[in-house]
Amino acid sequence: MSAKSFRDLIVWQKSIDLVVEVYQLIKRLPKEEIYSLSNQMRRSSVSIPSNIAEGQQRKTTKEFVNFLSIAKGSNAELQTQLIICVRLGYLTDEQIKPTMTLSEEISKMLTKICETLQTTNH
């Protein structure tokens, strides 16, 4: 990857947008969820750009791919938590749709970056 900084990566920028969206959604959750589901959603969403940033700053491509993989896992956790919010009746499908769409876009971007890095590194 030719990015000089993780801040130059579109996937990092979009994942920051995702964090903001998640924090906005969390405000709609019941107060009893403040230390459980909402906390998990904060942690998983923040983990995505954090792992992208940390991985980009590592010395090897292998390390970067590993951190991107962790970011993908955190993204999948977040999607699961959003679905749980809908199932519990805390949020509607309509309320989570923009966040879910962005999350899915980020997942595809992370997959593509990993594939590109692994192909060019062999």
Image (cartoon, rainbow, N blue to C red):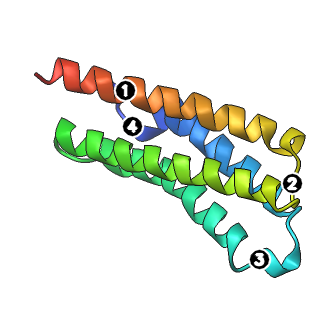
> Which numbered dot is residue 62?
none
How many residues crowd mark 4 within 10 Å: few (<14), some (14–19), many (20+)?
few
Residue 82, position as x, y percentages in the image? 71, 52
Marks 2 and 1, how far apart at CA? 32 Å
Looking at the figure, which quarter contains the C terminus? top left
Marks 1 and 4, how far apart at CA? 15 Å
**SS for tag 4?**
loop
The reply to whether callout 1 and callout 4 are in contact (CB within 8 Å) is: no
The reply to whether callout 3 and callout 4 are in contact (CB within 8 Å) is: no
**SS for tag 1?**
helix
Q: Nearer the viewer, mark 1 or mark 4?
A: 1
Identify the residue under disc 4.
5
N-terminal of the two: label 3 or label 1? 3
Kind of residue at disc 2: Leu
- Out of 61 and 57, give the one closest to the viewer: 61
Identify the residue under disc 2.
91
N-terminal of the two: label 2 or label 3? 3
Residue 1 visible to the viewer? no
- Residue at the spot 87% in from the left edge and 44% down from the top edge: 95
Q: Nearer the viewer, mark 2 or mark 4?
A: 2
Kind of residue at disc 1: Ile
Q: Relative to residue 111, is residue 72 depicted above or below?
A: below
Q: Relative to residue 67, is residue 112 depicted above or below?
A: above
Q: Relative to residue 108, is residue 38 depicted above or below?
A: below
> Which numbered dot is residue 113?
1
Kind of residue at disc 4: Ser
Marks 2 and 4, how far apart at CA? 36 Å
Residue 92, position as x, y percentages in the image? 88, 48
